[in-house]
Amino acid sequence: MKLVLASRNRKKIGELKALLSKHFADIEILSLDDVGITGEIEENGETFEENALIKARVAATSGYIGLGDDSGLTVDALGGAPGIYSARYAARRNYAGDHDDEGNNQALLTDLADVPPAERTAAFVCTIACVLPDGREFVVRGETGGVILSEYAGNGGFGYDPLFYYKPLGKTFAELSPEEKNAVSHRGLAVELFAKALKGTDVAL
């Protein structure tokens, strides 16, 4: 079975294949480059779901099953921010430092500086959209709740992982092994829901 993920990131494609291989014995994840889709996709949706669908529809123009994902961090005390702008939060906040993972984390810490620990609740969100060759669409959403710390812990993961404390395991996402993280992460949960939904269609798998 071939699916096209609206991405050119080989690491992301490899991670998705590893997660889906548990559900589908013969699966191949193709990139946009693999199917000759060029140019940037304009993610102008207002929700994770809308952006994931925008990307999946582009991927589906290949004729294969199209997949799109959108993910980010939502913090309750910030009204759901960074949200869909998680990857460019520092830039949107006009943060003076770098606009990379470190900059995003520092911008988040700055915005939460006066927020007490009990009110620093947050969730990682991942949506996966699927567009079938016949035009049918569905979207699934995985969420993992946690708390934003006031300082980093752990050297693994990426993005906001060093600040995201997952209470059930007593560690930040940056302190979890890849296996531990996949078992509880928003992306792992979304992939489980996606696999179940895809199996529920009448598409030949």
Image (cartoon, rainbow, N blue to C red):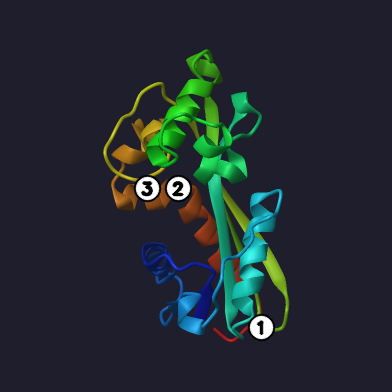
* Side (left or right) of 182 relative to 122: left
Which image quadrant is residue 130 in?
bottom right
Q: Nearer the viewer, mark 3 or mark 1?
A: 1
Q: Which amino acid does the dot numbered 2 rest on? A: Ser
Residue 124 visible in the snapshot: no
What whole-number distance in Å separates the C-alpha atoms at marks 2 and 1? 29 Å
Residue 45 pos. (x, y %): 70, 54
Q: Which residue is mark 3?
A: 181
Disc on res. 20: none
Q: CA distance from mark 3 to mark 2?
A: 5 Å
Percent of width and height locating residue 81: 61, 34
The residue pinned by badge 2 equals 185
Give the answer, above or below, for where 59 lies relative to 102.
Answer: below
Q: Is residue 178 visible?
A: yes
Q: Which residue is mark 1?
A: 133
Task: Give me the C-alpha separation between circle 3 and circle 1.
Answer: 32 Å
User: Dot 1: within a 10 Å radius of its alpha carbon, few (fewer than 14), some, or many (20 or more) residues?
Assistant: some
